[in-house]
Amino acid sequence: MSQPAETDKRKIIYTGNVQGVGFRFTTRRIARRFPVTGTVRNLADGTVELVVEGSPAVVDEFLADVAARFVNNIERCQSAEFASDESFRKFQIIR
């Protein structure tokens, strides 16, 4: 009997010039290149919330690509484990 693959669920809050620059749509496009699921949305305080689920190595690579793409826009990011039983079926933008 095989062990289930380890899954990493993380929530990241991005601060900086992250709204109005295509952050959500570009992040969704980047996510399509990786076997990840989750959500991305603008928050009322001007930040962007990204929730991502996948294998730890893939999540790290995906987040590195997002950070590299928006290196001039992100001033800070806060990352935390996302403790939820909710599983995502795809990666989508929440409006």
Image: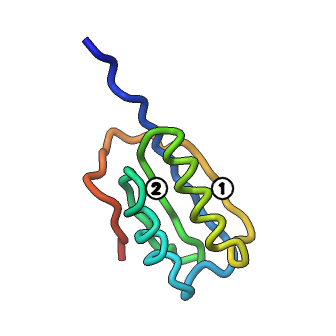
Quadrant of residue 12 in the image?
bottom right
> How does the figure colour the protein chain or chains?
rainbow
- Measuring from the top left, give residue 90's x and y in whole percent: 29, 57
Residue 31: which disc?
Answer: none
Q: What residue is pinned by disc 2? A: 51
| Secondary element at tag 1 | strand
Q: Residue visible at 42% across and 71% down?
A: 29
- Measuring from the top left, give residue 58's x and y in whole percent: 49, 46
- Measuring from the top left, give residue 43's x and y in whole percent: 51, 73
Q: Residue visible at 54% across and 88% down?
A: 20
| Secondary element at tag 2 | strand
Q: Is residue 54 left or right of residue 46?
A: left
Question: Which quadrant, please, contains the N terminus?
Answer: top left
Does 56 appear above or below 79?
A: above
Q: Residue visible at 46% across and 75% down?
A: 24
- Measuring from the top left, give residue 84's x and y in whole percent: 39, 41
Q: Residue visible at 66% across and 81% down?
A: 17
Q: What residue is pinned by disc 1? A: 78
- Dot 1 amino acid type: Gln
Does 43 appear above or below 55?
A: below
- Dot 2 amino acid type: Val
Q: Is residue 71 left or right of residue 63?
A: right
Q: Are marks 1 and 2 in contact (CB under 8 Å)?
A: no
Instruction: Classify mark 2: residues with Cα within 10 Å, few (<14), some (14-19) or many (20+).
Output: many
